[in-house]
Image: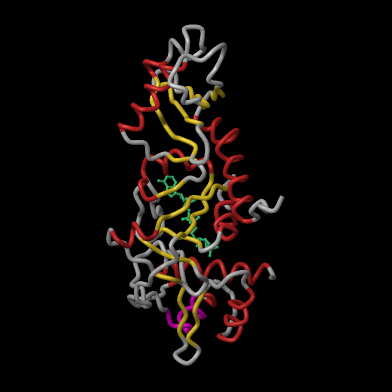
Amino acid sequence: MSKTQTKISKLISYWLRHKPEDGNIILDEFGWANIDDILAALKAKNLESTQSNLIALSSSFDKIRWKIDEVNHRIKATHGHSISILQEAEAQTPPLTLYHGTATKFLESILNGGLKSKQRQYVHLSETIDMAEEVGSRHGKSFIIEIDTKKLLDDGWNFYKTEQNVWLTSEIPPQYLDFEPWEFDIDKEMNNTFIKELKKEIGTAHVLSNEVKNLKVYAKHGPNNDCLFMNDNTNEYFVVHLTWSGKKEKHDWPLIEQYDSFEDFIKKRLLPDQHDWYLNKLNPISKEP
Ligand code: HQG
C-alpha cells in the first residue's frame, strides 16, 4: 500500500470511528457517511480519490474494516468506534467461548476492574486464539483472556458480530474472565482452606513460617496443586506446591517459587503456563502410547 493510500485509509477510519467532525462529515445513527462527503474531506486535504478507489482500498486490507454500500454511495466502519453508534445487525448468540487479546502490562488492572471499552464504544472479542494473539501483540507482550459468553448472556449481555467475525459487547467485570490456566476468582472459603493447609504443612524452619499471617491466596493453578499467595505487606508473591498431606512436611517442603512482584509472576510463570496450556489445547499430546 502506498504512503498516500495508507494516509487516506487512516484518515477515513479516523473520521468513521472517532472524529467525523474533523472532516465536516455527518454520520447517521448507524455510522454511515456519504462517500461524496468523504471524497470532499480528502480533497480539502489535497488527497484525490474516487468511490472505486475506496472499494479497491477496502478490499486490500488484511481484515475487513469498512462496509461500502455502492448503490447508495455510503461507507461505514465495521468496528473500532469510540463514538456511539447503533448496531444494525440484531444481537446474536456468540460461540460459548470468545477470546480477548491484551498486553501483560494491562493484566493487573483488568484483573481488578474487568475489561473496559476504554476509548471505544464496545469491548472487542475474537473468535480464535490466533486473532486475539494478533490484537494483543499490538499493545505489547500478548496475553489471552477467555470469556465465558454463556454466563454473560444469562446475565443480560448483548453481543454483535461484525463482518470480520469481531464480536462487540459491553464492558465485562472480572468474574466473567478466565486467565487460563490460573484461576483468580478466589472466594473467602477457598482462601481459608488453602491458608489452613499451608499452616499444617510448613514447619518452623520453612521460609514462609513467619510470613503466613500476612499471606492471602491470589490465584490457584487449575490443573495442579500450585497456589499463588500474596504477602500484603511486602507485595511479594509465592507459588507454593501444596502436598495436601494435612501434616508437617520435612525439610523445605512444600516447595515454593518466590516472585518480587505480580509483573514478575506474570513474566516467569503465568505467561509460560498459558503458552503451554494453549499449545496442548491446540495440539493435544496424542494419548496413543
Ligand atoms: C485494554 C483492532 C487496563 C484492552 C482490533 C486493550 C480490535 C484495559 C486496550 C479493535 C482494561 C484498549 C480494538 C483495564 C481493557 N485496564 N487496560 N481495565 N480493559 N484494557 O485498541 O481490543 O485493526 O481500544 O485489553 O482488531 O486492542 O484497528 O482495543 O488492550 O477489533 O481494525 O485496553 O481494534 O481493529 O485498546 O482493539 P483498543 P483492542 P483494527
Q: Is residue 36 magenta?
A: yes
Which secondary structure is most common in the magenta stretch? helix
Per the rendered image, the range of residues in magenta is 33-41
Pick the front one: 28 or 107: 107
Q: Residue furthest bottom?
A: 71
- Where 288 sits versus 272, above or below? below
- Where 39 sits versus 118, above or below? below
- Where 226 sits versus 54, above or below? above
Task: Indicate the colouring scheme.
Answer: secondary structure
Pick the front one: 48 or 31: 31
Which of the 4 image quadrants contains residue 86? Answer: bottom left
- Quadrant the N terminus occupies: bottom right
- For the point 49% across and 55% down, which residue is it? 100
- For the point 49% across and 57% down, which residue is it? 99
- For the point 42% across and 40% down, which residue is it? 109
- Location of residue 11 in the rendering, given as x and y in whole percent from the top left corner: 53, 68
- Where 43 sits versus 260, above or below? below
Q: Residue furthest top?
A: 204
Q: Is residue 166 left or right of residue 31?
A: right
Numbered marks: total: 0
Q: Residue furthest left?
A: 156
- Location of residue 33 in the rendering, given as x and y in whole percent from the top left corner: 42, 79
- Answer whether residue 50 is visible to the viewer in this image: yes
- Answer whether residue 121 is visible to the viewer in this image: no
- Location of residue 57 in the rendering, given as x and y in whole percent from the top left corner: 61, 77
Q: Is residue 247 magenta?
A: no
Which of the 4 image quadrants contains residue 37? Answer: bottom left
Q: Is residue 207 left or right of residue 19?
A: right
- Location of residue 23 in the rendering, given as x and y in whole percent from the top left corner: 45, 71
Pick the front one: 123 or 211: 211
Which of the 4 image quadrants contains residue 133? Answer: bottom right
Q: Residue furthest front?
A: 289
